[in-house]
Amino acid sequence: MSITSNFIQVLGVRTHYLTAGAEGSPVLLLHGGGTDSAWLSWSLAAPALAQTHRVIAPDWPGYGDSERPDVGYSTDYYVGFLLEFMARLDLPRASLVGISMGGAIALGAILRQPERVERLVLVDSYGLQPTAPAHKLSWLFVRLPGVNALTWALVRNSRAMARASLTGIFHDPRRVTDDLVDQVLAEMRKPRTGAAFMAFQRHDIQWQGLRTFYLDRLHEIAAPALIIHGERDSLVPLACARQAQQRIRGARLEALPGCGHWPQREKPEEFNRLVASFLAAEEPPVLRPPAGGGGQPDHA
């Protein structure tokens, strides 16, 4: 199944997105932060899921082949962008599959407009933990003038450092192939790659914790939900996924042994099988939030 490259204007941003398949209900694949892109995250998943679904994978503003606008990069911004992207493609409703930051954006979308989301798949999702790893150091690091940018520049110009950065999100270093390193380096060498993520981090990592933290609102989710999580994820501990499963009524958790933060690349066959099976399953009765339920907004 071939993957097609497309462009569309969304909120004034020339937005790149991938498509595969033409039949079946729409599935949006939402990539993560850092140096990620639709192609990096989903090139192994899109053809498999496109056998039965219309697959769409956008590059977020600031990533991939989308424009790099000067905007306030935040989870709220990306949630609004996603909902407008769906409207521009005339998608009143779709299933969302989000990895890491993309998972947090999917959560924000279903909490803001639940009627727009048919099914939800969270993959090693951001937004489930109150603090970042080594939180105070992370807060300092993203605010030190030039240090974050220097780190990006060093990785961009060193194949060895690019490979090392990938081994931090894979459990099995053998899965970090030369081809994948080449893809990451090509992505990092695009103009202003990393600027959006650095701005996002400065906004989201506050001294007291992360702005994007949805745990106390997960009980509001009524759509069928699947949580896929690498057991050896060093960025988002498996305990966060277990807590999320307990809060989302009827959610199923699939913990992948020997897998890090990027299951769709580290264990692609198992990942594709789990997602395809979940999307094809008969939909259970919709669970409605209790009367008067709901939490407080999670963003400052």
Image: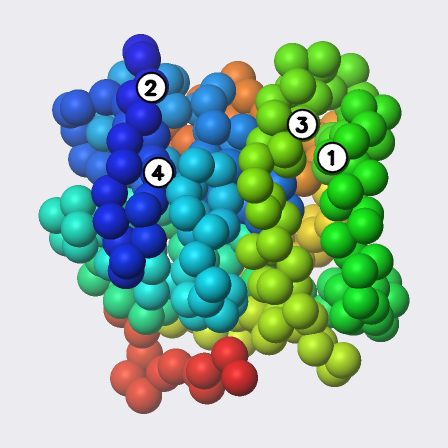
Question: Would you name the residue on which mark 3 appears?
Answer: 185
Q: Is residue 252 visible?
A: no
The residue nearer to you, when weighing 275 against 234, is 234
- Under mark 4, the amino acid is His
Q: What is the CA distance from the residue labelled 2 to the residue labelled 3?
A: 21 Å
User: Of label 3 and label 1, which has the lower sequence position?
Assistant: 1
Of the numbered discs in the image, which one, if any, rests on residue 16?
Answer: 4
- Under mark 2, the amino acid is Ile
User: Of label 2 and label 1, which has the lower sequence position?
Assistant: 2
The nearer-to-camera label among 2 and 3 is: 3
Quadrant for residue 57, please give it.
Answer: top left
Instruction: Where is residue 272? Give x, y as percent.
Output: 46, 24
Q: What is the CA distance from the residue labelled 2 to the residue labelled 1?
A: 27 Å
Of the numbered discs in the image, which one, if any, rests on residue 156?
Answer: 1
Q: What is the CA distance from the residue labelled 2 to the residue labelled 4?
A: 13 Å
Considering the numbered disc 3 on the image, is that residue within a helix, a strand or a loop? Answer: helix
At 28% from the left and 58% from the top, the residue drawn is 12
Circle 1 Cα neighbour tier, 10 Å, few/some/many (<14 / 14–19 / ≥20): many
User: Of label 2 and label 3, which has the lower sequence position?
Assistant: 2
Q: What is the CA distance from the residue labelled 1 to the residue labelled 4?
A: 22 Å
- Under mark 3, the amino acid is Leu
Q: Are marks 3 and 1 in contact (CB under 8 Å)?
A: yes
Q: Give the vertical position of 89 relative to 292 (above or below).
A: above
